[in-house]
Amino acid sequence: MTMAAVLVFSLFLPAAAQAQGSADCEKLKKVFNTDVETVDGVCKVEIIRKNIKKATFMDKKLSMEMMELAFHFSFENVDGQTAVMGELALLQDEVNPVLDELTNGKLEISALHNHMLFEKPRIMYLHFQGMGDMDQQAAAIKAAIEKTSR
């Protein structure tokens, strides 16, 4: 193998390997109608909840960002499938309908908990994960988000 061939493989093979790890971020951008950040082949989606205007913590009004009132999830191609993991900040009465949509979409619920004490309204954080088809996963997550008041 010539030195030029070695140089070509060493320069371009890592980029090709990284491209295999990238989920289709542009497709996700359209599905969720929001910007999608790409970091090392991972598509990261964040949708800040804007409908919870009167959230308080210990009787003090805090920003939605401070209280982590958002939907966060990430996609990555792994061995020909797509891995997805995420966290959704939900009002208490949104938990069951969202949980149903995610599990109907073949996603696993890995945790349901609160982050704070004494917040109003009560916010629950639902964590989910899955391995499979990105289109099916995105559709399930979108259907789950549509069950919220966003």
Image (spheres, rainbow, N blue to C red):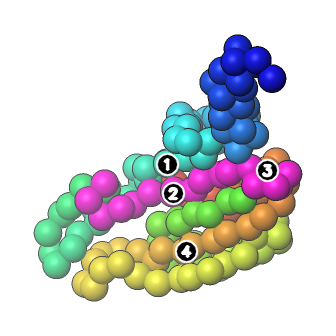
* Mark 1 / mark 2, whichever is N-terminal: 1
Q: Position of residue 125 (x, y in %)?
A: 48, 74
Q: Position of residue 9 (x, y in %)?
A: 72, 26
* Mark 3 / mark 4, whichever is N-terminal: 4
Count of number-bearing discs? 4
Q: Which mark is residue 71?
A: 2
* Mark 2 / mark 4, whichever is N-terminal: 2
**Which residues make up the magenta segment?**
65-82
Q: Which mark is residue 134?
A: 3
Binning the other alpha carbons within 10 Å of mark 2 as few (below 14), some (14 to 19) or many (20 upward) gives many
Please report contact status of discs 1 and 3: CB closer than 8 Å, yes or no.
Answer: no
Q: Amino acid at mark 1?
A: Glu
Alpha-carbon distance for marks 1 and 2? 6 Å
Please report contact status of discs 1 and 2: CB closer than 8 Å, yes or no.
Answer: yes
The correct choice, above or below, for 128 with respect to 29 in the image is: below
Q: Quadrant of residue 17?
A: top right
The residue drawn where x is 14% and y is 69% is: 60
Q: Which residue is mark 1?
A: 46
* Mark 1 / mark 3, whichever is N-terminal: 1
